[in-house]
Image (cartoon, rainbow, N blue to C red):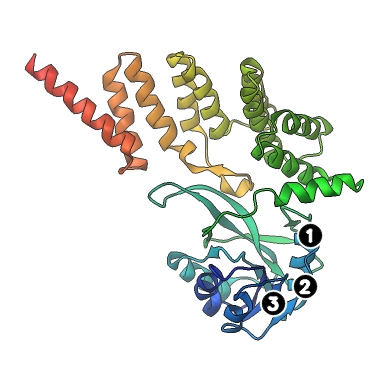
């Protein structure tokens, strides 16, 4: 069985740290906590789980802090978690099974990261992240923000997931401040960081700035396929916000230049036509989304509802407005197979039942 060091960086996490450590402490063989300047009970809570608590002055660089935490690890693998992450009960057994069966030749274990949820707690957004890294393998974190380890060697895709459950909003301006401070200091952002800088601009509704950085990122041609596709979608969102609707549609079609269609841009294209009352064309694109194969191991962001629920519920509406109630009801039932408790599904079902009753009475 391989051994695992849980390596965490923390600052003022008294409201979530105990929840995180309780979910993971008995799964790992060592816990390393690097504190970057807490002023609350974070250290006191951490001390209930480990004696390995270290101070590291914060310098606006997440990679530096994560590399520091890994430097104290003594087990076979280093695993990272954020303080507002948890390992759900259903994932614990899979994690323990991984420890028992993992080949020691594996360099990196990739695992799903669940970060978006609907009102009922169902996962709506996820992606694979490097979760366990072979200790003393030479791989290091890079990037002051949205830091990552570039995997080398043998990669294993795990069944267990890590769930990200925020208890409070983070500082919404922190990442953008770090990026703009780097740029002001003359630092040139490498492609991945350029991509995430553009996303930060987008989150701050700086549409023109975000569009400029996304377009430059794509023009340079050094991006990873999944980031390129996502950048095209965000160019579309920016152009839509700027009132450039035709250019927004063109940006969505640009995604097909990089790889076969993903369900996410197909749904976006469907929405573009739907919003203009062109329901038959919208139905074409939603139907195409249903044919797209979901492959989380590509590593890109996955909006899970785009691979089932959203196309089905939108096809229901499209065919209803086209007067084809039989097909509309069929797609509502198919949407229910993905989300049986969806308010939209239940509302539509009531309408179809009412239409059926009126038909029988007439």
* Residue located at (41% from left, 52% from top): 121
Q: Nearer the viewer, mark 3 or mark 2?
A: 2
Q: Give the camera-side residue of 170 and 227.
A: 170
Q: Is residue 317 above or below residue 196?
A: above
At 46% from the left and 32% from the top, the residue drawn is 290
Which residue is the site of mark 2? 56
Q: Residues within 10 Å of mark 1 (few under 14, many from 20)?
A: some
Left or right of 359 in this view: 236:
right
Residue hosting label 3: 76
Location of the N terminus by quadrant is bottom right
Q: Where in the figure is residue 221, as x and y percent of width and height?
A: 81, 34
Marker disc for residue 288: none
Label 1 sits on residue:
61
For the residues bearing labels 1 and 2, Cβ distance under 8 angstroms: no
Q: Earlier in the sequence, mark 3 or mark 2?
A: 2
Identify the residue at the far left of this view: 361
N-terminal-most mark, 3 or 1? 1
The vertical placement of 127 against 86, above or below, is above
- The percent position of residue 114, horizontal first and vertical second, equals 53, 54
Q: Quadrant of residue 66?
A: bottom right
- Structural crowding at the residue carrying mark 3, measured as other residues with C-alpha within 10 Å and reported as few (<14), some (14–19) or many (≥20): some
The image quadrant where one finds the C terminus is: top left
Percent from the top left, x then y, of residue 195?
A: 74, 41
Q: Is residue 199 visible?
A: yes
Crowd rating for badge 2 (residues with CA inside 10 Å; few <14, some 14–19, many 20+): some
How many angstroms separate mark 3 from mark 1 (CA)? 26 Å
Whether residue 227 is situated above or below residue 26 in the rendered picture: above
What is the distance, in whole Å, between disc 3 and disc 2 at their CAs? 23 Å
Residues under labels 1 and 2: Cα distance? 11 Å
Q: Residue at x 55, y 23 (%)?
A: 269
Q: Which residue corresponds to the image point at 43% horizontal and 68% vertical from the top-left?
A: 89
């Amino acid at each position: 069985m391989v051994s695992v060091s849980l390596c965490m960086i923390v600052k003022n996490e008294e409201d979530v740290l105990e929840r995180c450590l309780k979910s993971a402490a008995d799964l790992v063989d060592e816990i390393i906590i690097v504190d970057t300047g807490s002023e609350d009970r974070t250290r006191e809570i951490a001390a209930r789980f480990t004696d390995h608590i270290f101070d590291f002055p914060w310098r606006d660089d997440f990679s530096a802090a994560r590399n520091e935490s890994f430097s104290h690890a003594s087990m076979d693998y280093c695993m990272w978690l954020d303080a507002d992450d948890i390992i759900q009960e259903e994932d614990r057994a899979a994690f323990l099974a991984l420890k028992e069966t993992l080949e020691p030749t594996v360099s990196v274990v990739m695992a799903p990261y669940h970060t978006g949820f609907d009102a009922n707690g169902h996962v709506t957004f996820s992606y694979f992240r490097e979760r366990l890294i072979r200790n003393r393998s030479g791989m290091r974190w890079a990037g002051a923000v949205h830091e990552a380890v570039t995997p080398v060697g043998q990669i294993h895709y795990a069944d267990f997931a890590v769930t990200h459950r925020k208890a409070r909003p983070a500082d919404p301006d922190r990442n953008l401040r770090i990026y703009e401070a780097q740029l002001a200091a003359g630092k040139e952002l490498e492609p991945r960081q350029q991509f995430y800088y553009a996303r930060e601009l987008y989150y701050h509704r700086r549409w023109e700035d975000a569009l400029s950085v996304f377009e430059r990122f794509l023009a340079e041609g050094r991006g990873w396929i999944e980031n390129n596709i996502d950048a095209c979608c965000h160019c579309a969102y920016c152009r839509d916000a700027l009132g450039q609707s035709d250019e927004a549609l063109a940006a969505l079609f640009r995604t097909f230049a990089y790889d076969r269609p993903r369900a996410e841009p197909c749904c976006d294209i469907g929405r573009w036509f739907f919003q203009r009352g062109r329901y038959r064309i919208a139905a074409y694109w939603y139907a195409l989304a249903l044919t797209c194969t979901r492959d989380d191991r590509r590593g890109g962001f996955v909006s899970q509802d785009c691979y089932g629920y959203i196309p089905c519920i939108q096809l229901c509406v499209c065919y209803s407005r086209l007067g084809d109630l039989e097909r509309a009801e069929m797609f509502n039932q198919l949407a229910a197979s993905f989300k049986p408790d969806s308010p939209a599904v239940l509302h539509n079902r009531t309408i179809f039942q009412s239409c059926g009753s009126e038909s029988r009475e007439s």
